[in-house]
Image (cartoon, helix red, strand yellow):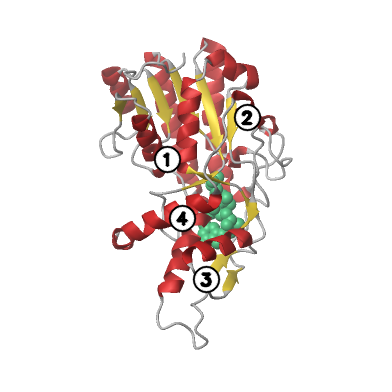
């Protein structure tokens, strides 16, 4: 059942993370007044009993499942059991509880790393499970595939209204800027900002170098978090039959339809930050999947497109980073 009433109770799971927070603010701005959230200290979503109690007490009408253990290429590679186990546990507990209390609709957030490493580009939803996964993030991918399949299975077996969105690489205000765990965009923003701020500059007046991981040749597509939040609202408001007409498996890619190499992203970030200095490569770090551009035909057919240009999104993220720099470094 689609979201129509501004008073409907919407539970945003993971509302303190970058994605959940973006969705929360966006829904608020769209006039939805009855939002529910719990921090991970208040409610451990990996615990099925606690999740079940919470759903029974709150009886949400709609659920957006944005809670997950997430991280960049290195974190995925270093903590395989956490990325697989925590995500499986969260999905099982939240999706099952939503089924048991009979919510109107659940929107589950997956990731485009669920597609095979060598999927055709752009990657259509039906390339799922047609080939081997990228090894660095296979653990996270398997968990996200399982979450989607649980939604698809509940739809098939019980008629539950559950939709999975597969967003491409996300970034924006509130992102993780920790260099060990973050994704490439916030990591390069921080490194470039710090290189530019390092004084004195080099003898020729140029800024200190920035080191990026790997060859810089892999290509990625970046989606601004507010655009994803808008896509979530749009999907919540779209009738179920329309969604299933374009997405019989209940899966919708969300992207911008364009990608660029990490080297080109570096150049754009240098331009936004005003960094004039060399770029070095740490080839001991992995490149990951060579390319990950999503086919957005299904969302196009429903009438949704992303609005924020990459440059504009990076500028807004950089503004946010500078405002919060001190607290981020202390944390
Ligand atoms: O964003 P990222 O960590 O994740 O890395 P993935 C993308 C590319 O940027 C890789 C390169 O080729 C990295 O080697 N890169 C260059 C850097 N410099 C840096 C840096 O300083 N930090 C980081 N983090 N990367 C993740 C998956 O894959 O994407 C997750 O591991 C999830 O499971 C997420 O799917 C969206 O795009 O490779």
For the point 55% across and 12% down, the residue is 157
Label 3 to label 4: alpha-carbon separation: 19 Å
Circle nearer the N terminus (1, 4) = 1
Disc marking residue 210: 3
Label 1 to label 2: alpha-carbon separation: 22 Å
Circle nearer the N terminus (3, 4) = 3
Choose mark 2 or mark 3, whichever is in front: 2
For the point 59% across and 33% down, the residue is 253
Q: In the picture shown, does residue 154 fall above or below 212?
A: above
Of residue 144 and residue 247, the one placed in the foreground of this image is 247
Determine the secondary structure under disc 3: strand
Circle nearer the N terminus (1, 2) = 1
Circle nearer the N terminus (2, 3) = 3
Residue 96 x, y percent position in the rendering:
43, 21
Of residue 152 and residue 248, the one placed in the foreground of this image is 248
Determine the secondary structure under disc 1: helix
Residue 58 x, y percent position in the rendering:
28, 20
Residue that numbered label 1 is attached to: 19
Instruction: Check contact, mark 2 vs mark 3: CB within 8 A.
Output: no
Residue that numbered label 2 is attached to: 300
Residue that numbered label 4 is attached to: 315
Q: Is disc 3 surrounded by few (<14), some (14 to 19) or many (20+) residues within 10 Å?
A: many
For the point 36% across and 34% down, the residue is 24
Residue lying at the far bottom in this picture: please name it: 203
Q: Is residue 307 rendered to the left or right of residue 50?
A: right
Circle nearer the N terminus (1, 3) = 1
Label 1 to label 3: alpha-carbon separation: 27 Å
Choose mark 1 or mark 2, whichever is in front: 2
């Amino acid at each position: 059942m689609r979201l129509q009433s501004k008073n409907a109770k919407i539970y945003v799971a993971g509302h303190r993370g970058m994605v959940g927070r973006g969705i929360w603010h966006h829904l608020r701005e769209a006039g939805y007044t009855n939002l529910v959230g719990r921090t991970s200290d208040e409610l451990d979503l990996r615990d099925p009993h606690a999740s079940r109690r919470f759903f029974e007490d709150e009886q949400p009408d709609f659920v957006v499942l944005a809670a997950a253990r997430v991280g960049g290429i290195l974190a995925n590679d270093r903590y395989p059991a956490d990325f697989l186990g925590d995500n499986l546990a969260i999905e099982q507990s939240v999706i099952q509880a939503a089924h048991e209390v009979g919510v109107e609709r659940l929107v589950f957030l997956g990731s485009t790393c669920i597609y095979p490493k060598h999927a055709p580009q752009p990657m259509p939803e039906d390339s799922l499970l047609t080939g081997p996964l990228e090894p660095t993030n296979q653990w996270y991918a398997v968990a996200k595939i399982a979450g989607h399949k649980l939604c698809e299975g509940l739809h098939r077996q019980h008629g539950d209204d559950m939709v999975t969105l597969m967003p491409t690489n996300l970034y924006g205000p509130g992102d993780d800027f920790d260099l060990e765990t973050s994704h490439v965009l916030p990591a390069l923003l921080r490194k470039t900002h710090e290189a530019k701020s390092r004084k004195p500059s080099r003898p020729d007046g140029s800024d200190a170098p920035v080191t990026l991981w790997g060859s810089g040749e892999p290509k990625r597509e970046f989606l601004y978090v507010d655009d994803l939040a808008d896509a979530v609202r749009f999907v919540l408001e779209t009738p179920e039959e329309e969604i299933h007409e374009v997405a019989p498996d209940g899966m919708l890619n969300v992207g911008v339809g364009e990608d660029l190499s990490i080297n080109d992203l570096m150049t754009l970030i240098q331009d936004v930050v005003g960094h004039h200095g060399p770029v070095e490569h740490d080839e001991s770090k992995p490149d990951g999947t060579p390319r990950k551009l999503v086919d957005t035909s299904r969302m196009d057919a429903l009438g949704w497109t992303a609005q924020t240009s990459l440059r504009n999104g990076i500028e807004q993220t950089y503004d946010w980073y500078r405002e919060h720099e001190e607290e981020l470094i202390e944390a």
